[in-house]
Amino acid sequence: MNNLENDITLVEKYFDETLSNAERENFTRKMLTDSNFKTLVEQEKLLIGAIRYQGLQEDLQYLKGVEKSLNDAKVVRFKASSKKWYYLAAAAVVGMLIAANFLLMPRTSSEELFQAYFKPYPNLFEPTVRGVNTPDDRTAAFQAYEQGDYQTAAVKFNAMLKTKEEPGVLLLLGNSNLILGNLDEAKGNFITLNSHFDELDIQAKWFLSLCYLKSGDMEKARPILSELGNTDISYAAKAKELLSKVK
């Protein structure tokens, strides 16, 4: 067994947690004094992470078997060092595993994710008067929203905003437009809310990210979700979870 094979065996035993005391001392010494050995450890760490990511729980004997079969068939002939061959063979196997898993893995569409994470924001801004036969337009707007009549609510909220911009009304109008499929209008509502007001800006960002998700624009959804996920707000956990699912 040459030095490279000895190193590989030592590294494998380290990650399998089967080192003897003498081997552990040897491992520690080589990590401190041998840069090539340290590089090998880092390569193995990345390789193991990739395999675990694919759900494979086998140990590195799998890769050794692949290496042996490729060697026996004399498929690959490199003039480079045997260490480079080991890295390239391992990288090729992991690449194929990742590609196969990616192609076969069931996908969750952006619309399915939207439906799973979107819930209309409740009307917390103004109480509505129940049992009024002829409510004024403002009360009627909030009542329509609470009753799920988002088309009427959107029309009345729009009329209210022409008189005065209010953050709560903008948020509910954005939700109404989002539910109705008026994505451009909804995006405009949330962008205005975020840029013109200090309050409700977090809610505006959350629902804006859902607008982009619903329209399939993942590139614009990701940075917003990432920003929300790095805070300690109530939306942080949901933003992190959704970000992990956005492809």
Image (cartoon, grey):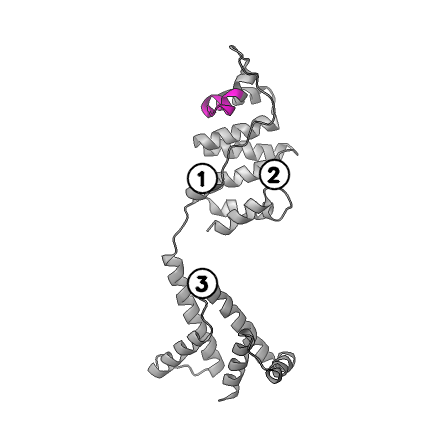
Look at label 2 and name its amino acid. Ile
**Which of pointers 3 and 1 indicates the residue nearer the eye?**
3
Q: Main secondary structure of the magenta part?
A: helix
Question: Start and end of the magenta stretch?
Answer: 143-154
Q: Badges 3 and 1: C-beta atoms under 8 Å apart?
A: no
Look at label 1 and name its amino acid. Gln
Look at label 3 and name its amino acid. Gly
Q: Is residue 208 above or below residue 146?
A: below
Q: Where is residue 138 in the image (x, y as percent from the top left)?
A: 56, 17
Q: Is residue 91 above or below residue 110?
A: below
Which residue is drawn at the image coordinates 51% and 81% (left, top)? 9
Q: Rounded to the nearest whole Å, what is the CA distance between mark 3 and mark 2?
A: 36 Å
Q: Dot 3: few (<14), some (14–19), or many (≥20) neighbours within 10 Å?
A: few
Upstream in the sequence, badge 3 or badge 2? Answer: 3
Upstream in the sequence, badge 3 or badge 1? Answer: 3
150 in the magenta segment: yes
**Which of pointers 1 and 2 indicates the residue nearer the eye?**
1
**Pointer 3 residue:** 55
Residue 113 vs residue 195, the one in the foreground = 113
Please give the count of numbered marks on the rendered protein.
Answer: 3
Q: In this view, does 237 lie above or below 37?
A: above
Residue 115: image tag = 1
**Which of pointers 3 and 2 indicates the residue nearer the eye?**
3
Disc 3 element: loop
**Pointer 2 residue:** 202
Residue 89 appearing in the image: no
Which residue is drawn at the image coordinates 57% and 36% (left, top)? 204
Residue 72 appearing in the image: yes
Q: Badges 3 and 2: C-beta atoms under 8 Å apart?
A: no
Disc 2 element: helix
